[in-house]
Image: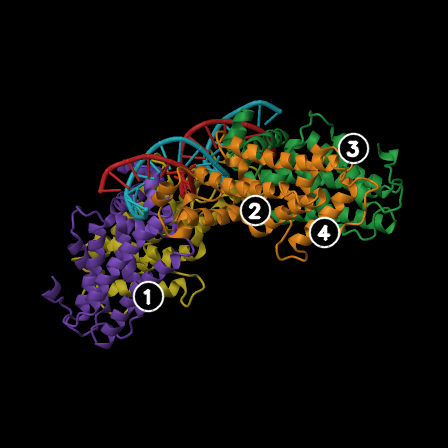
Chain colours: A orange, B green, C yellow, D purple, E cyan, F red
Amino acid sequence: MKEKITGVSIQLFEKQGFSETSIQDICDSLGVTKGTFYYYFKSKEALLMDIHLRYIDDILEHQERILSDVNVNYRTKLFQTVNRLLQSIEQQGASARVFFREMRHLSEERLPLIIAKRNQFRVNIETMLRQGVDDGEFRGDLNVRIAAFGLLGMTNWSYQWFHPHGELSDREVAQIFVEMLLRGIEHVGADQTLGGDFR
Amino acid sequence: MKEKITGVSIQLFEKQGFSETSIQDICDSLGVTKGTFYYYFKSKEALLMDIHLRYIDDILEHQERILSDVNVNYRTKLFQTVNRLLQSIEQQGASARVFFREMRHLSEERLPLIIAKRNQFRVNIETMLRQGVDDGEFRGDLNVRIAAFGLLGMTNWSYQWFHPHGELSDREVAQIFVEMLLRGIEHVGADQTLGGDFR
Amino acid sequence: MKEKITGVSIQLFEKQGFSETSIQDICDSLGVTKGTFYYYFKSKEALLMDIHLRYIDDILEHQERILSDVNVNYRTKLFQTVNRLLQSIEQQGASARVFFREMRHLSEERLPLIIAKRNQFRVNIETMLRQGVDDGEFRGDLNVRIAAFGLLGMTNWSYQWFHPHGELSDREVAQIFVEMLLRGIEHVGADQTLGGDFR
Amino acid sequence: MKEKITGVSIQLFEKQGFSETSIQDICDSLGVTKGTFYYYFKSKEALLMDIHLRYIDDILEHQERILSDVNVNYRTKLFQTVNRLLQSIEQQGASARVFFREMRHLSEERLPLIIAKRNQFRVNIETMLRQGVDDGEFRGDLNVRIAAFGLLGMTNWSYQWFHPHGELSDREVAQIFVEMLLRGIEHVGADQTLGGDFR
DNA sequence: TATGAATGAGTGTTCATTCAT
DNA sequence: CATGAATGAACACTCATTCAT
């Protein structure tokens, strides 16, 4: 039941927005009464927190897996990271949109935890970029902080325009994005042709 | 008075969100009564539309000016475009954030106009990129559509983290972004060192 | 101007009701501002009072003329009264409907005057009936009070269904009504066939 | 509770009018909060519709019973119909007045149903008159449509002046009205003395 | 587990009216 | 004569939340 509530809530929050979705809407969608809702969730905001945690924990977990894989180089890690984000937008688009749009409705007690995890995600990317620089895969003068922001911007923004069943797949968009990024952040003099390794 | 209402509304909408800001909040901030608000605006949403139009019309106008300037090359236009967007986030950050976050609260009658103008902005960037490709400044195999989305993502996303009085100025961030972008989209074989022309 | 305000107000009050018509509606219809309205009328209710007075004074005046005409018998007076009422519904239908429906919105200070005039109208009918009884035209056992109410009911109610351009004219409906009434209230033994005198 | 809300609403709507009665008035009368009201009724107008349906369904049901009774003649049916209407004004005067006065506040979606039922009531009376004509109880040249309107006007209008505890009872008024009507619509030559059957 | 009745504070909006200009 | 800015009280309605059952 808790799963079902979370599921329809994500759909409704995405379609109508958090503030515009009432507990009644959620209950109507499930054919239960409001008492039931409050049996499973302490408040509307607690439900929102749940949704946020699910999403960020999931992508953080994937990210850690990518970063700790010693068998791939940093260019590949970069691709995998971007690809994973786009994939999550394709596969759990509603969750992603709720995550990006409704964070602000979390209370002051709960928000910091989400922000911390979100920062963790960004810091992990910075770390990846810095290690890539140290390994000679990325340009030595790279401002990794700004570069990380740029990468996240390109990728996260796609939830505003990317349609799962559009002209290009998530993988194709990821490849184009990474090509754009790499030609700039790759160390000059390194092999400029994109290797086929992560295609 | 209309200006004053718009002004405080932007501040409040940014801080608390559109749905979370009541007409009463706005009126209290100004020391007027709700009747006064409704003398100047037909509805809360009409006010939001006003804010949106002001913002998008302003940046569209700047963009047109940049694009139609025949004295600068496309790399420079690119820099100017990115710089202008970041500048607008620095100088009218609240408006920008309201624009990006609250668009969804526009009614179905009003939303299409804003979306059309927003698309116009993106299409203008695509056009600029395409002409840069034709002129040999940008890579011939550039997917201008995706590139435009990427550029907009990098830039627009900055409203989430960019602080006007932070470590780097808008101009510096713009330079870093454009460098990142250019090394990828510049025609291979062209002068890879960034010209000083737009510094 | 005062005439124009009264005119459009009658139309609007009839179409939308008094409570549902705002001063703004009235002003919009005339292309003037609310200040103008309050220059000519002390309040919305004062306007309503004006409309009521115009209507009731007009029909009272006609009634007095009918009743004081010594050249016609009481059956004819009866017909003329009914006919006049139906005529007023045909010709000033909007005023009539406003009169019947919106009286309740008059204030406690103003209402008694209208009620007094309205009662006067009914009492005049009672008087006419009583004199007709005394003259032997109407049945001796007639309850003139109830009969007057019945007559007024039949006639006034027609504002709910009578359409000026319908199958029957006001005159034809009046004839049918008076025939219905007369066959009952005429003195038994009097000539039962309707005389052509008031056709 | 729904009954209680309906009950006090009828009283308030009658005394002050629909538009002039606020939900707060209703709630104050019952010592409950507005939330409670909206738990039972979707809107103020839905409550009004409820009141209308109760009233018209009740009198329609009584009418059908009168019309389908094969043991009484049409003159008696006529008396019973008029008597029942006056009775309903005596016993449920408030409902009756709300019904006649506030119908206009029903929405365009709901109004047609009430109008249809109201027309049904009138058509039933026309049918009764027509059958009475065919049976030779009423005059052959009777315009049943106009006669029905006249009958309804006489009777319905009484809600404007009839007071339950006045000089005459509903039954007495009904007898006077029916006598007035019958002497006109009875077939000439039929027994002119009113039978005692419905006295 | 789940219901359904009730709360109470809050929302956007309307509107008759006033008044300085 | 007429305007236009401003008021302030009221209104219908919503909604997250509680709680006895």
Q: Which residue is mark 1?
A: D146
- Residue D98 position, x and y percent, is 31, 49
Q: CA distance from mark 1 to mark 2?
A: 51 Å
Q: CA distance from mark 4 to mark 1?
A: 93 Å
The quadrant in which residue A157 appears is top right
- Pointer 4: residues within 10 angstroms few (<14), some, or many (20+)? few
- The amino acid type of the residue labelled 4 equals Asp
Q: Which residue is mark 4?
A: A197
Task: Provide the chain ID for the residue under circle 1.
Answer: D
- Residue D144 position, x and y percent, is 30, 69
- The amino acid type of the residue labelled 2 equals Ser
Badge nearest the viewer, 4 or 2: 4
* Labels 3 and 4: the sequence-earlier one: 3
Badge nearest the viewer, 3 or 4: 4
Q: Are marks 4 and 1 on the same chain?
A: no
In the rendered image, which quarter contains the C terminus of chain D? bottom left
Q: CA distance from mark 4 to mark 2?
A: 48 Å
